[in-house]
Amino acid sequence: MFYRENGQFKSNYASDQQMLPILQDRVFMGLLLVFAFGAVPLFVSDYVFLSLLIPFLILTLAAIGLNILVGYCGQISIGHAAFMSVGAYAAYNLALRLPQLNFLVVLVLAGLIAAAVGILFGIPSLRIKGLYLAVATLAAQFFTDWLFARVKWFTNYSSSGSVSTAPIELFGWKVDSPAEKYLFLLGVLVVFTVVAKNLVRGHIGRAWMSMRDMDVAAEVIGIRPVYAKLTAFAVSSFYVGVAGALWGFVYLGAWEPLAFNLSLSLNLLFMIIIGGMGSLLGSYFGAAFIVALPILLDQVPNWLGVEMSTALASHLASMIFGSLIVFFLIVEPHGLARLWAIGKEKLRLWPFPH
């Protein structure tokens, strides 16, 4: 009754091709942005910012990058934390050796460096696919782990191998409090989400999806596999590289090479499987689930008066992750995003049964 597009006529191409064609969606999204930018910083505690919202925003950006490659282009990757580490160390060295650069420029340059590395490791996708491509991307993970641990130049010859960053400054604005970090990250995420949405809706996104669905047929109709696959690796690595720079500068502040290990790569893959591959909204759902579940497992037993050790909660989280991955792969391969879409379809039909 309330969620229906009856009477909402499109009189030009721009209105017909807009990202949110239904008025109710546009109103909901506007209210959500107002709430996120205006209300959340006023009423949320620093603990929620540091432990929940800030990692959620950064991991969502990384999940969007991985989803572009895996969900939209169909190229498997299980080593994307490697490109996060490339972005983090590139941003660290740029900020250290070129301190006059604005941090936004540092982010873009770090993303471009990660994109170049992503293209390099994406070249095998032109000849191999499936499990073999996954192993090739896994090689990137092991290579970057070795590189940043052994080549001391990247860590400014630190004896411990760890690096620390200075506070972020943007046009005289020092981003140091949890609320300011949240607002900065939210703004970056909104911009990158809009860009990703327009990319996947455009001709380049259609080329990615055609390679995912049937690469031989796509090549027959004129789509170049070299262009489609390498652009997917480049865009995906750019997003993940920016997310890695933000993870190091905004969330961690100081890190060592093990901060971007294989577990982080697998968590990114879990996010898009649970949230929904081939869906930007699924990246949000998956990141929220991965970030919130360990915190809930720590808090819920205390609320219920059940004693649970930290080790048991950690193992229980791993068991739940594995069970949900198997569940979604069997029951709903498109993840939580598909369940959300089904709910919207049912709302459009309510209260009529047809």
Image (cartoon, helix red, strand yellow):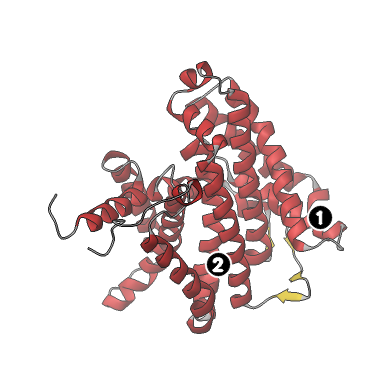
Residue 54, numbered label: 2
Name the residue at 62% across, 42% down. Answer: 235
Residues at badges 1 and 2 in contact (C-beta under 8 Å)? no
- Which is more toward the observer, 232 or 11? 11
Q: Distance between the residues labelled 1 and 2?
A: 23 Å
Q: Where is residue 275 drawn, in percent x and y? A: 40, 51
Give residue 170's mark. Answer: none
Res. 161 in view? no
Q: Residues within 10 Å of mark 1 (few under 14, many from 20)?
A: some
**Direction left: furthest residue:** 353
In x, y percent, where is residue 22? Answer: 38, 57
- Judge whether 210 appears above or below 164 on screen: above
- Residue name at image x 77 percent, y 69 percent: 166
For the residue marked with disc 1, what is the amino acid? Leu
Q: Nearer the viewer, residue 286 or 337?
A: 337
Left or right: 173 in relation to 323: right
Q: Mark 1 points at which residue?
A: 94
Label whose residue precedes the other's in the sequence (1 or 2): 2
In the image, what residue occupies the spot 79% across and 45% down?
A: 151
Q: How crowded is mark 2: few (under 14 residues within 10 Å), some or many (20 or more)?
A: many
Residue type marked 2? Ile
